[in-house]
Image (cartoon, rainbow, N blue to C red):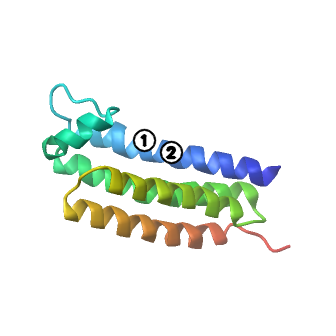
Amino acid sequence: MKNVLATIIGIVIAGFTVHLFESILGHNLFPLPEGADPSNMEWIKNNMDKIPTGAKAFVVIAHFLGIIVGMFVAAKISKVSMIPSYIAGGLMLIATFVTIFMLPKELWFSLSDGILAIAGFFIGKYLAAKQITND
């Protein structure tokens, strides 16, 4: 039961981390254009060129940190298994790649988002493994 809880909390914390960096920090530091609707995928698809580069960079940072934090928290709670971390990190990695393929993006954006998401998974795995006790 503890591993199920660790998985759920890891996913929730990962999602919160993404929201914090992408929406709260990124959109406040680099405001979207007037009339923007970031919750509407059609608007985003049709207006990707109007989104500030800084906001896009915060999306990349958000995905990277979300994976790391989610995996770390899942392991910190579980303490005995890497599986919750793999599930949390894996789901966030999949979500990142779905977003990459769903939205038309500049090459730098897609490449950096994908590469940093994969790097985030391995960094998250390393940090999570340090939380597992082998008693």
Q: Secondary structure at mark 1?
A: helix
Number of labels in the image equals 2
Which mark is drawn over residue 96? none
Question: Quick one: 29 or 121, which is closer to the camera?
Answer: 121
Left or right: residue 30 versus residue 81 is: left
**Horizontal and vertical percent for residue 112?**
30, 65
- The answer to whether the residues at label 1 and label 2 have Cβ atoms under 8 Å apart is yes
For the residues labelled 1 and 2, the Cα–Cα distance comes to 6 Å
Q: Badge 2 is on which residue? A: 15
- Determine whether the residue tagged by mark 2 lies in a helix, strand or loop: helix
Residue 88 in the image: state x and y as whole percent. 60, 56
The answer to whether residue 28 shows anywhere in this view is: no
- Residue at 29%, 50% (x, y): give it: 103
Task: Judge whether 66 appears above or below 82 on screen.
Answer: above
Within 10 Å of the Cα at label 2, are there few (<14), some (14-19), or many (20+) other Cα atoms? some
* Residue 99 in view (yes/no): yes
Name the residue type under label 2.
Answer: Gly
In the current view of this chain or complex, which residue is farthest to the top?
A: 35
Q: Position of residue 69 (x, y in %)?
A: 53, 56
Vertical comparison of 119 with 65: above or below: below
Q: Residue at x 24, y 52 (%)?
A: 104
Q: Relative to residue 62, is residue 33 depicted above or below?
A: above
**Residue plotted at (56% across, 54% down):** 70
Disc 1 marks a residue whose amino acid type is: His
Residue appearing at x 19%, y 40% in the figure? 46
Label 1 Cα neighbours within 10 Å, binned few <14 / some 14-19 / many ≥20: some
Q: Quadrant of the C terminus?
A: bottom right
- The single residue placed furthest to the right in the displayed view is 135
Residue 93: % across, % down: 48, 60
In the image: residue 59, left or right of residue 33 = right
Q: Say which of 50 and 22 sits in front.
A: 50
Q: Which residue is mark 1?
A: 19
